[in-house]
Each structure stands twice: as structure tokens, then as C-alpha cells.
Amino acid sequence: MLFLVFELDGERYALDAREIVRVLPLQPVRAFAGTPPYIAGVIDHEGAPVPVVDMAMLALGRPARTLMSTRLVLVDDKAPVASNTLSGAGDETSPRRIALLLECATRTQTLSPEAFAEAGIATPEARWLGPVASDALGFVQWVKVEQLLDERVRALLFPDPPTWRDALWGNVSPAGRAP
């Protein structure tokens, strides 16, 4: 399997290349108040806002560095979309994109899925950290994209229905909820 390898403070991590929609150069990110610190903000990709997850902030508690090798990697959020009877949205909606802000994301590596093994350490606060593989350079840890966002953060990034839509059309009750 082909992986995109990135580094955080000298430790290597890998994303399954099949989960990657596109790799973009670093570009300005518009910050959003009220989100967890690892949500860096949003970028404009082909006319649509895409939330940005800062992997350095998520993993290490520090913002990603602006390096020549820092990239924005677009992936699809694979979590099921709740059916919404108010807006008619459902499984037919376009994929929900997330941009991962990654340092040192300039290499690919082929690794067999069988080369990965559980690390022997439970990481309930970092469910996105998968098994590890070893090579001549040391360990590389598989990042599980589908585990990056918990339901609370998903609800912030992808409200269903979008909160602005009901307010725009005046479909908001005095309590602030759609009728």
C-alpha cells in the first residue's frame, strides 16, 4: 500500500494514499473562533470552505510550523451523514472535506498492511493513532482519518442542517432552532 509520510517533531506518521483527495501547498487559513485549538480554521478550495485540522496542534499541542514542506492534504470525512428531513439532505450530499495541515509531507512510502502491528499502548484520547510499522528509519505510525474527529467536533464543523441556512430564510424559532 502507498502512504504519504509526514513528520511531527521527528516522529513519522503515514496516511493511506487512497484516502487522499489532493495535496495542496500551504495557503492562508482563516481562523474560526469557538472551535477546538486543533481546528486551525478554513480554506477556500474550489469555491467551498474546507475545515483545517492542524495535526501538530492535535498531536503535540503546538501549531504547525510554516516550512517549505508543510502541506494541506484534503481527505473526505467518511462518517455517515445523518439524514435531515428539514433540508432534504441525506446520503446523496457531496463528500465532506477536511484539510489536514501536515509538516514534512513530501514523501511517499510503500508498506504492506501486514507490516503494521498494534503498538501495545491504548490511546483513547488519540483514537486516530493506528498501528505502527518498523523500517530502516524506525517506526512509522498509521493515522486513521476516520477517527480524527469525534461527534462533537463533527457537529461544529458540519452542522446538520447548516445553521446559517435556516437563519437566512427566517426558519428559526425564538429558541434559535429550526421549527
Image: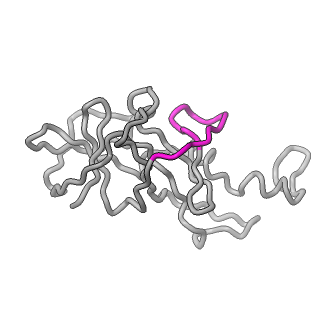
The magenta segment: 26-41
Residue 32 highlighted magenta (yes or no): yes
Position of 23 relative to 150 (above/below): below
Q: Nearer the viewer, residue 74 or 173?
A: 74
Position of 20 relative to 29 (above/below): below
Question: Looking at the image, which residue sits at the far left?
Answer: 136
Specify whether 174 is left or right of 139. Answer: right
Image coordinates for residue 141, horizontal then vertical, percent = 25, 42
Specify whether 141 is left or right of 95. Answer: left
- Tell me what residue is drawn at x 71 percent, y 57 percent: 161
Image coordinates for residue 168, horizontal then vertical, percent = 85, 56
- Tell me what residue is drawn at x 44 percent, y 57 percent: 75
Specify whether 123 is left or right of 89. Answer: left
Point out the image quarter for the C terminus: bottom right
Residue 49 highlighted magenta (yes or no): no
Q: Quadrant of residue 1?
A: bottom left
Q: Nearer the viewer, residue 70 or 174?
A: 70
